[in-house]
Amino acid sequence: MSPSDTPLVQVKDLHRSYGKIKAVDGISFSISGSTVHGFIGPNGAGKTTTMRVLATLDMPDEGDVLFEGRSLMDYPDEFRPEIGFMPDFLETYVDITVEEYLDFYARAYRLSTRRKKKRLADVIEFTRLGKLLTRPAYGLSKGQKQRLSLGRVLINDPRFLILDEPAAGLDPRARVELRTLVRQLADGGKAVLFSSHILAELSEVCDSVTIIDGGRLCASDRVSGLQHQIDFGVKVNVVLDAPSGEEIERLVRALAEIPGVNRSEEALRGAWFSYEGEPEVRSGILTRLMEQGFKVTDFHTASSDLEDAFMQLTERKTSS
Ligand SMILES: Nc1ncnc2c1ncn2[C@@H]1O[C@H](COP(=O)(O)OP(=O)(O)OP(=O)(O)O)[C@@H](O)[C@H]1O
Ligand SMILES: [Mg+2]
């Protein structure tokens, strides 16, 4: 399903300080319905602080959050049922079973008996908690707790899900399962904000991404746009078939003369270059090299995933 064009949630110039610490220092981005929106940043970047404001658990010092164009700050009680917040740890009470835990939240949301029954059945099936219902919640494994935590936020069927590091501590299989669940939720119409610093994980599941560092915005875009953005100046490696030293020098010079190439340097068995322009420029460069008689055996981007995007964008921000 393609994400809707109108953002469900708009974060506008958000500021939140703790004493002298500017945890969030002017962050703006939008989240659409039917979308998984990744929220990336290193430890202490301000992700949890932002998410708590979005969940109406905290107030910003400045800025606003619009939900369908209306201020969340002005109508927190009205919008709260539309928002599900999954914190990065699960608080459970001693001696409460999984079933009692879910039932407690279903009652807290004041669901009618009929609706409560239906929602509990749906959520238990979706999160595969059926076999764990009589187990004490505090004794669940990390992955089981995450599923219970996700189940809890889904009980009242909110349209906007805020998941703070939901994949932290999960094994590879549980990560894949979580991604599948999150994808299903977005395909069903929900807007999902999913934070992580494990970037590779997000590139698989996200439609759009916001990257923050030190409380400031580094980038916010669709994943495809972000990859395009970092393609500016991205490094490409050219490997030749058993080149001599002179051949490598000739390659470096040839690359430097091609329009769009802004840097070229020797590398093992060839050279690397960086260029500016559309990704298609790259194929033109390869054609030029072939025309000049270079025996190219390999031609690949040295960096293109989100991990590198993150490194580049945060470096760019700190050096600017
Ligand atoms: N209640 C608080 N009191 C004082 N400082 C705080 C508080 N909450 C957050 N901070 C500070 O604000 C900054 C941002 O913290 P936040 O928890 O939002 O980061 P994060 O991106 O979620 O990091 P992590 O990846 O480690 O979870 C940090 O410097 C943190 O120490
Ligand atoms: Mg956090």
Image (tube, rainbow, N blue to C red):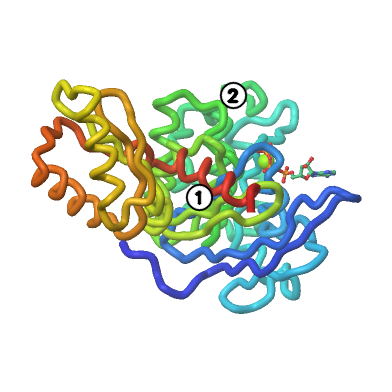
Task: Say few, some or many: other residues with alpha carbon within 10 Å of mark 2 (under 14 / 14 to 19 / 20 or more).
Answer: some
Cβ of mark 1 under 8 A from ligand 1? no
In the image, is residue 22 above or below residue 200?
A: below
Q: Position of residue 199 (x, y in %)?
A: 48, 38
Question: Which kind of residue does numbered mark 1 sit on?
Answer: Gly
Q: Along the horizontal axis of the image, is 90 left or right of 166?
A: right
Q: How many marks?
A: 2
Task: Please tell me which residue is depicted at 61% across the width and 51% down the height of the picture.
Answer: 317
In the image, is residue 144 above or below residue 83?
A: above
Q: Which residue is mark 2?
A: 140
140 vs 272, nearest the viewer: 272
Q: Along the horizontal axis of the image, is 78 left or right of 300?
A: right
Q: Residues under labels 2 and 1: Cα distance? A: 27 Å
Q: Quadrant of the C terminus?
A: bottom right
215 vs 32, nearest the viewer: 215
Question: Which kind of residue does numbered mark 2 sit on?
Answer: Leu
Residue lying at the far front of the rendered structure: 246
Q: Can you see residue 185?
A: no
Q: Quadrant of the N terminus?
A: bottom left
Q: Name the quarter showing ligand 1.
A: top right
Task: Please tell me which residue is depicted at 41% across the width and 40% down the height of the picture.
Answer: 179
Secondary element type, mark 2: loop
197 vs 87, nearest the viewer: 197
In the image, is residue 26 above or below residue 146?
A: below
Q: Can you see residue 210?
A: yes
Q: Give the label, 2 or 1, closer to the camera.
A: 1
* Numbered badge on residue 38: 1
